Image (cartoon, coloured by chain):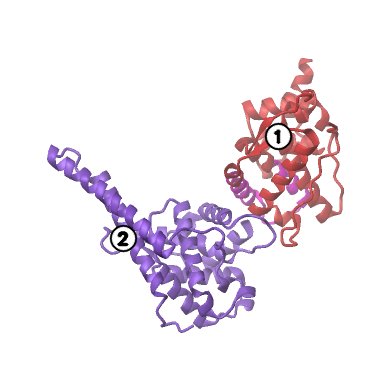
Chain colours: A purple, B red
């Protein structure tokens, strides 16, 4: 896979629609939660109309997106990306789209599980995987914690998680901390050993989030070195 | 419906061929083992149990935290730490109550500890079984339970003390069921356990209270 190739246009379209949904829902939430509540009657009515309209548009976008692009989460196809399971590895281009979708849903489910409000970009997931494939990691020679650490750094460095354009952003440090937590749990899930137990992938996501949450404070601060992250992954891999 | 001193055995999950002492520190392994224990005991006793997996995950992580915090850098008595860690697990199970009883069989004999306190009995059997598996694998020792497992008065005392006084006492009671000398003074401290063996005053006060009242 050429690292500079563009992702499938449908992935970009999915991201665009998700961005619109997210911005509409979050915008409406901000108005509802932060808007002045002591408005004159006609403005109060207009404010309510705006909220109702935003909700209606968001639902329409949802319907279109689900119908045309299939945005729904499908547990039957959800599983670790093929770059983490060498036995399934085919050529990069065959798996790129499904891998990007799986990584996207892993990050989205982790964020939801941890009650973190961030938008995940499937386009950037696809680009990250394409670049990973071009690096041709010597998978069999690296230990799993090292692979988790590499993926964690790539997710955070590529800003796969963030706010969509046009949405008021939170403080950078707070967003970075949230993104790190989600990236850690998703990277852990990606490389988790399968086969010995019967837990569903969604249950594994929950477990990864909870084990990650146990050590969340260690992910904050300025002393987050590669060695420290790798140690945390060693612990988490042995605990899930 | 025989529930005797022979524990209701479960086959431990494979856990990637890791030794039981390592596997027991994995959330997936623990969850699978607890579910197997529930199924085995339900089959033997006719009790219908329900398991709350959210509570199960949370208690396991609390146990793992406590385990890591108490484990000495150098273990000079590994067998004793296995006993202690099993008692810690029992404490977390009793505090979190991840299992509840949906239905007892009609002919349940309440003088049998398995029916007197079904959840507590399940937790104790689970911890004893995990402990026995570690001993068998690591020390080539087959463990048998103490006659206290069938003594209803000990179970009265156990339930009353851990539910109304101090859940840490579960660690001492676990030792009692396992046939190990408990440390009643500071049961939740491994350091204190090592340094104050032989203190049986608390045992007299708590474990035998019901007997004295008889």
Badge 1 crowding class, 10 Å Cα cut-off, few under 14, some 14 to 19, many 20 or more, is: some
Tell me the crowding category of disc 2: few under 14, some 14 to 19, or many 20 or more residues within 10 angstroms, Cα based. Answer: some
Horizontal side, residue B102 vs residue B209: left or right: left
- Give the residue at mark 2: A20
Residue B146 x %, y %: 84, 35
The residue lying at 41 percent from left, 82 percent from top is A5
Residue under the point 68% across and 36% down: B49
For residue B48, the mark is 1
Task: Say above or below: A40 vs B201.
Answer: below
Q: Position of residue A205 (x, y in %)?
A: 54, 56
Q: Residue A37 magenta-drawn?
A: no
Main secondary structure of the magenta stretch: helix
Give the answer, above or below, for where B83 lies relative to A102: above
- Mark number, residue A185: none
Q: Is residue B12 visible?
A: yes
Question: Picture quarter containing residue B8?
Answer: top right
Say if B64 sits above or below A223 in the image: above
Residue B11 on image: x %, y %: 79, 50
Toward the front, the furthest residue is A67
Secondary structure under tag 1 reads strand
From the viewer's perspective, is B43 left or right of A13? right
A62, A80: nearer the viewer: A62
Whole-number angstrom distance, CA of label 1 to CA of label 2: 49 Å
Q: Are marks 1 and 2 on the same chain?
A: no
- Identify whether B106 is placed above or below A106: above
Q: Residue at x 70, y 60 (%)?
A: A196
Q: Could you tell me which residue is drawn at 73 percent across and 33 percent down?
A: B47
Q: Which residues are magenta?
A: B58-87
């Amino acid at each position: 896979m050429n690292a500079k190739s563009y992702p499938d246009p449908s992935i970009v379209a999915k991201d665009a629609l998700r961005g619109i949904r997210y911005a509409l829902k979050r915008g409406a939430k901000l108005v509802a939660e932060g808007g002045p509540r002591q408005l004159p009657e006609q403005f109060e009515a207009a404010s309510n109309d705006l909220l109702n309209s935003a909700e209606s548009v968001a639902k329409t976008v949802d319907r279109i997106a689900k119908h045309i692009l299939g945005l729904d989460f499908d547990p039957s196809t959800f599983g670790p990306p093929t770059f983490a399971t060498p036995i399934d590895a085919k050529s990069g281009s065959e798996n790129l789209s499904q891998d990007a979708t799986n990584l996207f849903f892993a990050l989205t489910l982790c964020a939801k599980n941890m009650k973190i409000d961030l938008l995940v970009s499937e386009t950037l997931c696809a680009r990250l995987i394409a670049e990973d494939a071009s690096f041709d990691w010597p998978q069999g020679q690296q230990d799993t914690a090292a692979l988790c650490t590499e993926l964690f750094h790539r997710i955070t460095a590529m800003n796969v998680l963030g706010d969509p354009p046009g949405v008021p952003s939170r403080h950078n440090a707070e967003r970075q901390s949230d993104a790190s937590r989600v990236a850690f749990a998703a990277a852990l899930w990606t490389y988790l050993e399968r086969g010995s137990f019967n837990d569903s992938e969604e249950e594994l996501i929950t477990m990864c989030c909870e084990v990650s949450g146990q050590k969340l404070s260690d992910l904050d601060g300025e002393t987050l070195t590669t060695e420290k992250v790798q140690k945390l992954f060693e612990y988490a891999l042995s605990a899930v | 419906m025989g529930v005797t001193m022979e524990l209701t055995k479960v086959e431990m999950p494979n856990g990637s061929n890791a030794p039981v002492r390592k596997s027991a520190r994995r959330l997936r392994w623990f969850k699978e083992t607890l579910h197997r224990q529930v199924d085995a005991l339900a089959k033997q006793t006719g009790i219908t149990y329900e398991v709350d997996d959210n509570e199960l995950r949370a208690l396991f992580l609390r146990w793992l935290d406590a385990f890591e915090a108490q484990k000495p850098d150098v273990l000079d008595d590994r067998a004793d730490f296995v006993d202690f860690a099993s008692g810690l697990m029992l404490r977390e199970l009793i505090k979190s109550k991840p299992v509840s009883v949906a239905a007892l069989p009609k002919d349940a004999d309440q003088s049998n500890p398995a029916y007197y306190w079904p959840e507590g009995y399940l937790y104790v059997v689970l911890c004893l079984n995990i402990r026995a598996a570690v001993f068998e694998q690591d020390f080539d020792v087959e463990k048998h339970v103490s006659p206290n497992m069938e003594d209803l008065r000990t179970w009265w005392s156990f339930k009353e003390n851990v539910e109304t006084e101090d859940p840490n006492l579960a660690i001492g009671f676990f030792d009692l069921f396992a046939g190990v000398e408990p440390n009643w003074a500071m049961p939740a401290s491994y350091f204190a356990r090592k340094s104050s063996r032989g203190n049986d005053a608390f045992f007299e006060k708590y474990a035998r209270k019901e007997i004295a009242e008889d």
